[in-house]
Image: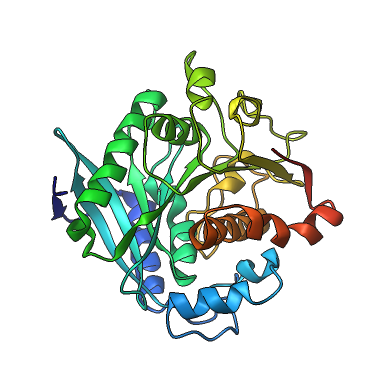
Amino acid sequence: MSADLRLRNSSRAPGTRAALYVVVLALLAGCSRDTPVTGTTPIKAANPIELEKHLLARKPEVDLFRLKGPFRVTTLKDVEIGIAPRGSVSTDLYFCASAKQAPLIILVHGHGNSKDDHLFQALHLATWGMHAMTIDLPNRGPWIANGRVLARLVEAVRRGPEALENRVDPEKIVLVGHSFGATAVASALASGASASGAILLDPAGIGRELPALLKKVNAPVLVIGADEEIWPTRNREYFYRFIPSGVAEFSIRDSVHEDAQYPTDHPLRPVADSPIATEQAQIIFVSALTAAAFSLTASGTLDYAWRSYANAFQEEKFFNARRK
């Protein structure tokens, strides 16, 4: 099976969202320069393989991933990828410009959201040597059915790598889901999606069959939660409870549900969904996400990431940590 790729112009972003696109695309053209938000890592590497060796040789530290990585990023907006037996998924692609072939991180939005809400997370991951893809699925569900679509997308990428210019390592695909998007990711894994693992950003669970599906998950899964004392999400406890093994979880102090998204790397607009969401917390989320994605793609385990969180655990910036 060969995945079908078609490009089309973006025409869905009215008003301020369209203006945001213009500014963001201008930023993407020079994304390796320093920014007032995160800066750029002083680490030098010619390619992701060299970077991986460098990172694995030093003490893991999540704060390193608060900075942008050393690589430039090239982007393709509104790419349609065909999936069997019919249909397609709209995606935005963020390629690490220095990588001929690299892991792929697929980010899935939650309820009422879109691929645009994970723009900076995808961009940030690509600066660290991992290709990233944000996707649009029906944003009011059904989320378990969305997961089956996601599993078909993963299969299309694996069997038709030419759709992504043969730049993706098909053995290193990581799924990331925010809110109800985490239910979709769990459903995809239970449906047999060939992924190295998953990262769930303040997940929310929905669907009577979800516990049974979670029991079928056999890939490493990390739950990065917001502060439940401020913002408890629906059935978040399901993911750690029902995934039988290889799952870890912690919460980020003083963060809220929307902090697990990150639409842009500059404060171009206020966070409309919640007045207490902050860019600082979004940067903490993206650093934890990047450490976990690197860990899964470099080793197939969460060990590197878990060690990188040690200081944050000790200082209780990350809390309620558990692993099985």
Which quadrant of the figure has residue 200?
top right
Q: Is residue 39 visible?
A: no
Relative to 106, is 164 above or below?
A: below
Q: From what the image shows, is residue 317 above or below residue 238?
A: below
Where's residue 57, x and y in %? 64, 77
Query: Which residue, as the protein is rendered here, is positioned at the far top?
Result: 208
Residue 235 placed where, x, y %?
61, 23
User: In percent of the image, x 55 and y 43: which residue is there?
Assistant: 220
Q: Is residue 141 above or below residue 157?
A: above
The way the protein has been coloured in the rendering is rainbow
Q: Is residue 160 left or right of residue 230?
A: left
Q: Residue at x 64, y 60 (%)?
A: 304
Who is closer to the viewer here, 32 or 16? 32
* Circle count: 0
Judged left or right of residue 323, residue 70 is left
Residue 17 located left or right of residue 250: left
User: In the rendered image, which quarter contains the C terminus?
Assistant: top right
Q: Is residue 4 at least partly visible in the picture?
A: yes
What residue is at 43 percent from the left and 35 percent from the top?
A: 189
Q: Position of residue 296 (x, y in %)?
A: 53, 55
From the viewer's perspective, tell me whether residue 166 is left or right of residue 125: left
Q: Position of residue 171 (x, y in %)?
A: 37, 55
Q: Quadrant of residue 228?
A: top right
Quadrant, the N terminus = top left
